[in-house]
């Protein structure tokens, strides 16, 4: 009798164990159970607002109110006020390091409140640019190609309050960038813009006697002079590393060693080198060339051909 009662119990137990094993084998892998949510595009922000006021914080607050999960990164908010060409150079330099889908929010806008357009530009690389139509994106478009451009005229893309005539960074550009981060289709922001304002920056002039260029910026906080003369232009003049190069800055001659990096000269000494963007630059090793010699952009620079170089003046 006891054996007859025990047999069904054993069968039931085996059936239960078998069912559990089957269930476990069919259970989804925890890593596969729920796909990770897609990360929202990064908003990369640049202005000439500075950091002494609340303008940047307000713009970021507007973005957060529309797209709370958006990731915001800063290029700089210290662009020289109103200097579109400087901002265009920074934008050109950083965009290659960001992926397709990135939203660049750029507000250097001396024409705010006028007839200039507020636009969204999409490059053929798939990046978006929310900015005034004043040439800021020209260099990037020339390099990466233009997919399309739209004027931001749809009120749904703007702040849901009265739009100021002097703070479009808050009222138009920041909301538009946030909506892009939320996945909105940029083509409904407004009508197509068939012709963007084109910025034509000055370039170095190659002559028989040498190259005339400009000091286009400072590598702050180090005070190094950044020029618009490329390493290829310098090489075409015949110079090689360790040469002494006589240049004229604002028509005043100075002789500099052409070296690879800062520590190739003693601390406190001046040097000419090729910066990380492939441009001729001038620095003081562990010093500030701009402050030491009272030179700030705009300024001119002339580099003669090696064979045409005059007897070098006293070294600075």
Image (cartoon, rainbow, N blue to C red):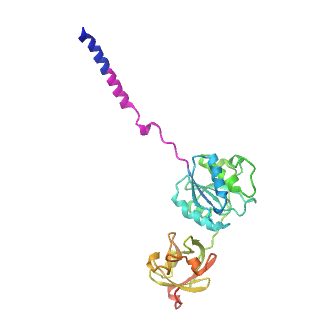
Q: Judge from the rendering whether residue 11 lies leftward or rightward of residue 201; answer left or right.
A: left
Q: Is residue 121 visible?
A: yes
Find residue 19 and report its horizontal and vertical position in percent. Answer: 35, 24
Residue at coordinates 34% horizontally, 28% vertically from top-left?
21
Q: Is residue 260 visible?
A: no
Whether residue 22 is in magenta: the answer is yes
Query: As rendered, which of 103 and 220 lies closer to the eye?
Result: 220
Find residue 27 and report its horizontal and vertical position in percent. Answer: 39, 32
Find residue 173 and report its horizontal and vertical position in percent. Answer: 67, 54
Find residue 38 and report its horizontal and vertical position in percent. Answer: 52, 44
Q: Quadrant of residue 300?
A: bottom right
Residue at coordinates 62% horizontally, 63% vertically from top-left?
138
Query: As rendered, which of 52 and 279 lies closer to the eye?
Result: 52
Q: Judge from the rendering whether residue 163 lies leftward or rightward of residue 214; answer left or right.
A: right
Q: Quadrant of residue 164?
A: bottom right
Q: How many marks?
A: 0
Residue interval drawn in magenta: 15-40
Q: Judge from the rendering whether residue 246 lies leftward or rightward of residue 106; answer left or right.
A: left
Q: Quadrant of the N terminus?
A: top left
- Reply above or below: 144 against 205: above
Q: Residue furthest top?
A: 1
Q: Quadrant of residue 25?
A: top left
Q: Judge from the rendering whether residue 89 lies leftward or rightward of residue 241; answer left or right.
A: right
Whether residue 100 is in magenta: the answer is no
Q: Which secondary structure class fits the magenta region best? A: helix
């Amino acid at each position: 009798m006891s054996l007859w009662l025990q047999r069904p119990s054993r069968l039931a137990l085996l059936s239960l164990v078998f069912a559990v094993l089957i269930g476990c084998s069919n259970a989804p892998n925890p890593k596969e159970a729920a796909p990770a949510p897609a990360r929202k595009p990064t908003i990369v922000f640049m202005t000439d607002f500075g950091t002494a006021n609340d303008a940047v914080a307000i713009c970021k607050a507007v973005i957060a109110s529309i797209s709370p999960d958006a990731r915001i990164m800063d290029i700089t908010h210290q662009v020289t006020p109103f200097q579109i060409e400087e901002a265009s150079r920074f934008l050109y330099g950083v965009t290659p390091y960001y992926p397709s889908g990135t939203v660049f929010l750029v507000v250097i806008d001396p024409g705010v409140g006028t007839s200039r357009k507020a636009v969204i530009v999409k490059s053929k690389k798939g990046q978006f640019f929310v900015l005034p139509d004043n040439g800021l994106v020209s260099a990037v478009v020339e390099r990466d190609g233009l997919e399309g451009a739209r004027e931001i005229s749809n009120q749904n893309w703007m702040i849901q309050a009265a739009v100021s005539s002097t703070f479009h960074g808050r009222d138009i550009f920041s909301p538009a960038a946030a909506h892009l981060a939320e996945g909105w289709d940029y083509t409904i922001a407004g009508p197509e813009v068939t012709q963007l304002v084109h910025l034509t920056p000055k370039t170095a002039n190659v002559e028989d006697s040498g190259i005339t260029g400009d000091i286009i910026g400072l590598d702050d906080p180090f005070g190094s002079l950044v020029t618009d003369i490329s390493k290829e232009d310098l090489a075409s003049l015949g110079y090689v590393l360790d040469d002494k190069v006589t240049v004229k800055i604002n028509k005043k001659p100075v002789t500099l060693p052409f070296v690879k990096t800062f520590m190739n000269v003693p601390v406190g000494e001046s040097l000419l080198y090729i910066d990380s963007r492939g441009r001729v630059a001038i620095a003081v090793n562990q010093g500030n060339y701009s402050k030491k010699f009272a030179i700030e952009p705009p300024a001119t620079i002339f580099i003669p051909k090696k064979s045409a170089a005059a007897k070098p003046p006293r070294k600075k």
